């Protein structure tokens, strides 16, 4: 493989990885934008999404097979279920804490994360479950660069989800309400917007996106386990910070940037792939120090 | 309360009578069994205990050893170093003639000193850390192959497949790094090239960077030395990226789960395994007897435990007495003892002279013996 081949291959790898990060980062950033909460349980919702997708796939595979039809169906079912789970969490754990200091709700989020991951661990005995799908390894081969159709399908579906979300936020009344609440909740209430309903909707969409990413990861990697949400939760947080937390476009961009940075960073000679996480979290630290608002975030002016 | 005390007293009396009766008929040959019968590894330990008891029964039915019947005492090491020393002390003070067992290397290690100081002959059935070799005082014998043997088996396979450029991937933990390092040294000493020596983080799902790196080095063979869960993902992504040549995995990945997670990608992957019953033609009779007696299938290390007991009896017979030093001498002098897991002879370091590792290949979603 020539250097150019390696660069092109890593570009493809980075985009695939980046679209997973972006999907998960969107949920982070939406929730932060609207109630200023870093929802640390978000990575675990991704994990729950993968497991619920796994369950649905084994249920529907008899009818629809283990190929794209079955996968799409179980992904949609998983998105709805995890969306509702996200709403339940918001109602039970976060709603009563909204008036409390910011730190209390942050700790609540950590607790929810533990409940979810340990709950799934108890249910599955900490075992790895094989996500059996019936997808081949056929793909496009351009010289030494190889991309499977599965990978292309995953990136395209991630892009479709993101474009849909983008239109929802920018072109619908609910989207407008979300943006308004992010700016000033009290004013929104005075204008007759049902703030709680919109917050609920935000949680639903954010969790559903995480579930979609979870099912995709299950399909792509072929196994799911209770701890899979931890690292991706941190990575998605990093992606959201890179893009500017609270910004939808920022999360998409941040996800892709992080994916590409990891893919190329690990190809630097003498830096093995085991340095991948050091690389991404090192960037997080640098960014928090030098440009805490991220690539697309606006500097917040606190009015007294 | 009173009733239970009465029962206990009665029980004691009966046992006493029974033991007297036994002692009156013939002298017993007391053998200690050290396996974990509680804790996380209890299943494997009980399986080994079952196999040892089965071997003892067979020996007794065939007339015993030197005219004596074998009786056993089990010490539970719980796969824990502290519990293991307690279990070993118990066996030593019960004055057993010899000990068979040892499953977790970490638990077996501290007992070597106790048995060594007491001069008790000890056949280590399953534990196989290379650390045991150095701690051995000369009285212990390993009937399971160690990491060195796996390296030899692996190198043999790669050489037979005409590989020159080898890539090795481990996970940075003691076990997989050790195996990777030994393989690297051995491969380099043969004048061949290790083109990639990589580490992956545990629990990592995306290995695309690693795959690109390895693919760019165009190795003839790839050796994954760590465990199945992450191994399946690495193999899958290697195959997805179009790597079509040889992939082999170490015994830590010897699990049906690897094939389940990896699916079609794992077809044709080689795996090195301890001699488990499923892959041993000679173990058929043992397997049937075990099933008949315990109503379950023998597990991974039962064949070695069974061989261990049979070898011990054979050595005592050859020694002609239950003198501990004589037994140790006899075990060391073992020449091609026909175990169901393969022939047993020992090196001067009391490890197996011939590796008993077998090579498996994934065919149709199952591990089968590679012929």
Image: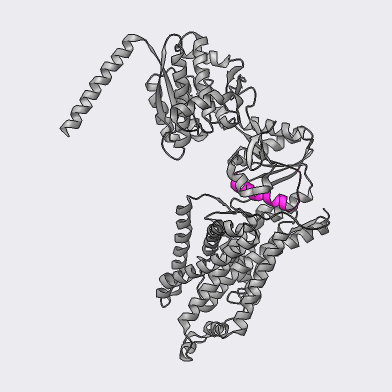
Q: Is residue B241 magenta?
A: yes
Residue B19 screen position, x and y as percent: 30, 16
Name above or below for residue B256 compared with residue B288.
below
Magenta residues span: B227-246
Residue at left offset 63%, top offset 64%: A20
- Left or right of residue B284, residue A121 in this image: left
Q: Quadrant of residue B249?
A: top right
Residue B156 screen position, x and y as percent: 72, 31
Residue at left offset 60%, top offset 27%: B280
Name above or below for residue B13 compared with residue A300.
above
- Left or right of residue B131, residue B45 in this image: left
Query: Most extreme residue toward the bottom, as rendered?
Result: A191
Query: Most extreme residue toward the front, as rendered?
Result: A63
Name above or below for residue B197 compared with residue A53.
above
Q: Is residue A288 visible?
A: no
Is the image coloured rainbow, by chain, by secondary structure, or in one colour? one colour
- Left or right of residue A19, residue B17 in this image: left
Q: Is residue A160 visible?
A: yes
Q: Quadrant of residue B363?
A: top right
Residue B364 screen position, x and y as percent: 66, 42
As rendered, which of A161 and A269 lies closer to the eye? A161
Residue at left offset 74%, top offset 35%: B158
- Left or right of residue B168, residue B290 in this image: left
Name above or below for residue B182 compared with residue B24.
below
Residue A78 screen position, x and y as percent: 54, 65
- Would you say the magenta stretch is mainly helix, strand or loop? helix
Q: Is residue B338 magenta?
A: no
Q: Quadrant of residue A297?
A: bottom right
As rendered, which of B4 and A62 lies closer to the eye? A62
Q: How many marks?
A: 0
As rendered, which of B79 and A165 lies closer to the eye? A165
């Amino acid at each position: 493989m020539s250097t150019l081949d390696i660069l092109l291959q890593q570009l493809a790898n980075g985009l695939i990885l980046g679209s997973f990060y972006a999907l998960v980062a969107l949920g982070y950033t939406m929730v932060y934008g609207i109630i200023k909460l870093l929802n640390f349980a978000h990575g675990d919702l991704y994990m729950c999404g993968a497991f619920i997708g796994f369950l649905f796939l084994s249920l529907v595979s008899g009818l629809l097979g283990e190929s794209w039809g079955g996968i799409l169906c179980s992904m949609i079912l998983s998105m709805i279920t995890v969306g509702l789970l996200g709403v339940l969490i918001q109602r039970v754990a976060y709603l009563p804490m909204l008036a409390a200091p910011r730190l209390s709700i942050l700790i609540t989020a950590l607790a929810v994360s533990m409940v979810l991951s340990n709950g799934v661990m108890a249910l599955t005995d900490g075992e790895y479950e094989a996500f059996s799908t019936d997808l081949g390894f056929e793909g496009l081969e351009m010289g030494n660069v190889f991309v499977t159709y599965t990978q292309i399908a995953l990136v395209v579906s991630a892009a479709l989800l993101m474009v849909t979300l983008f239109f929802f936020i920018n072109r619908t009344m609910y989207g407008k309400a979300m943006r308004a609440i992010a700016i000033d909740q009290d004013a929104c209430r005075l204008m007759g917007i049902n703030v709680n309903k919109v917050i609920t909707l935000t949680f639903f969409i954010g969790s559903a996106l995480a579930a979609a990413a979870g099912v995709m990861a299950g399909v792509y990697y072929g196994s799911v386990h209770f701890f899979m949400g931890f690292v991706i939760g941190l990575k998605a947080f990093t992606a959201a910070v890179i893009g500017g937390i609270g910004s939808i476009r920022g999360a998409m961009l941040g996800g892709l940037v992080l994916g590409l940075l990891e893919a190329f960073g690990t190809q630097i000679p003498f830096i093995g792939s085991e340095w991948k996480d050091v690389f991404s979290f090192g960037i997080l630290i640098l960014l928090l120090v030098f440009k805490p608002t991220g690539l697309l975030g606006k500097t917040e002016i606190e009015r007294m | 309360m009173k009733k239970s005390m009465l029962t206990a007293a009665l029980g004691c009396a009966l046992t006493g009578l029974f033991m007297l009766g036994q002692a009156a008929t013939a002298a017993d040959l007391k053998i200690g069994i050290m396996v974990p019968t509680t804790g996380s590894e209890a299943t494997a330990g009980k399986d080994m205990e079952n196999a040892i008891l089965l071997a003892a029964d067979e020996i007794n039915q065939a007339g015993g050893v030197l005219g004596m019947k074998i009786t056993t005492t089990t010490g539970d090491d719980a796969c824990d170093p502290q519990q293991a020393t307690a279990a070993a002390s118990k066996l030593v003070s019960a004055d057993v003639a010899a000990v068979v067992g040892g499953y977790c290397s970490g638990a077996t290690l501290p007992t070597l000193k106790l048995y060594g100081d007491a001069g008790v002959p000890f056949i280590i059935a399953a534990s196989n850390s290379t650390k045991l070799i150095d701690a051995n005082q000369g009285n212990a014998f390993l009937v399971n192959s160690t990491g060195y043997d796996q390296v030899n088996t692996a190198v043999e396979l790669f050489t037979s497949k005409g590989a020159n450029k080898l890539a090795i991937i481990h996970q940075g933990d003691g076990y997989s790094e050790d195996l990777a390092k030994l393989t690297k040294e051995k491969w380099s000493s043969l004048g061949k090239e290790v083109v990639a020596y990589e580490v992956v983080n545990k629990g990592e799902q995306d290995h695309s960077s690693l795959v690109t790196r390895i693919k760019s080095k165009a190795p003839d063979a790839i050796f994954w030395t760590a465990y199945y869960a992450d191994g399946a993902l690495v193999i899958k992504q290697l195959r997805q990226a179009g790597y079509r040549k040889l992939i082999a995995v170490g015994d830590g990945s010897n699990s049906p789960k690897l094939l389940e997670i990896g699916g079609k990608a794992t077809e044709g992957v080689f795996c090195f395994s301890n001699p488990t019953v499923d892959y041993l033609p000679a173990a058929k009779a043992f397997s049937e007897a075990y099933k008949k007696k315990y109503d379950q299938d023998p597990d991974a290390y039962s064949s070695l435990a069974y061989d261990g007991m049979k070898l011990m009896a054979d050595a005592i017979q050859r020694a002609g007495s239950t003198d501990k030093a004589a037994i140790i001498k006899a075990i060391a002098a073992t020449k091609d003892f026909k175990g169901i897991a393969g022939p047993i002879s020992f090196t001067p370091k009391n490890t197996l002279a011939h590796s008993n590792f077998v090579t498996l290949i994934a065919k149709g979603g199952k591990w089968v013996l590679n012929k």
